[in-house]
Image (tube, grey):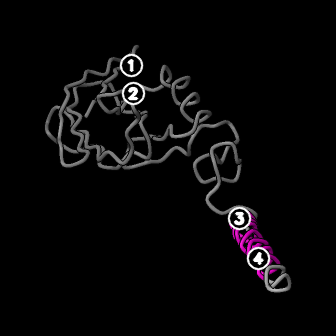
Amino acid sequence: MKTSLNSRHIAAVLLAAASAFGIAGTAAAQQNSASGVVGGSTTDNTSTGNIHGTGMPQIQQQGGVSFVSGGVGLDESQALRSAASEWPLSLRFTATGGEYVADVHVTITDAQGTSVLDTTSRGPYMLVKVPPGRYSVHVSHADISKTSAVTVTASGNARASFTW
């Protein structure tokens, strides 16, 4: 009987060790790909969202409009908030409890109704470089659409916040 208990104990220990090595191996595989990182984070300079090592996500271009979105990680949200004064239009997306919202579809149209930007935000902040003028910002998240009129001046910047 004692041998049977020892065998069960040894089997349980071996099973636990195998599970632990399997989990550790999976984590190591996720971190050690051919490029050195899979997924990355906002503190990882090789992450697609942080190619400059400053916390600022990559600036994108659509037609004549430059934009950047993100803010999921702390360093990225701080970088976007700090840079907001340098961009003509700053957008913020939150839930009613103040939680950040990402994956918001954003369409910006000029005073003539022509679309100047049609994209999806990667996080709760979006900064947009548009020429001075009047714009309508149309956003959609969780099947709820909202619109805000903004005026971008030559010397200042416009801000719009959307809450779901």
- Residue occupied by mark 2: 90
Q: Which residue is mark 3?
A: 27
Q: Which label belongs to residue 157?
A: 1
Q: Which mark is residue 87?
A: none
**Helix or strand or loop: what does disc 1 sit on?**
loop
Lower position in the chain sequence, tag 4 or tag 1: 4
Q: Kindly identify the residue that appears in the image at 75 percent across and 66 percent down.
A: 24
Callout 3: 10 Å neighbours few (<14), some, many (20+)?
few
Query: Which residue occupies 72% across, 63% down?
Result: 31
- Prevailing secondary structure class for the magenta stretch in the rendered image: helix
Determine whether label 4 and label 2 are within 8 Å by CB. no
Could you tell which of marks 1 and 2 lies nearer the N-terminus? Answer: 2
Q: Which residue is mark 4?
A: 18
Residue displayed at 39% across by 27% down:
90
Query: Looking at this view, is 85 or 26 the one in front?
Result: 26
Label 4 and label 2: CA atoms lie apart by 51 Å
- Residue flagged by tag 3: what amino acid is it? Ala
Residue placed farthest to the top in the image?
155
Q: Secondary structure at mark 3?
A: helix
**Alpha-carbon distance for marks 4 and 1?**
58 Å
Please state which of the two labelled residues, at mark 1 or mark 2, is closer to the viewer. 2
Tell me the quadrant of the picture where the C terminus can be found: top left
Q: Give the label, 3 or 4, closer to the camera.
A: 4
**Residue stretch in magenta:** 8-34
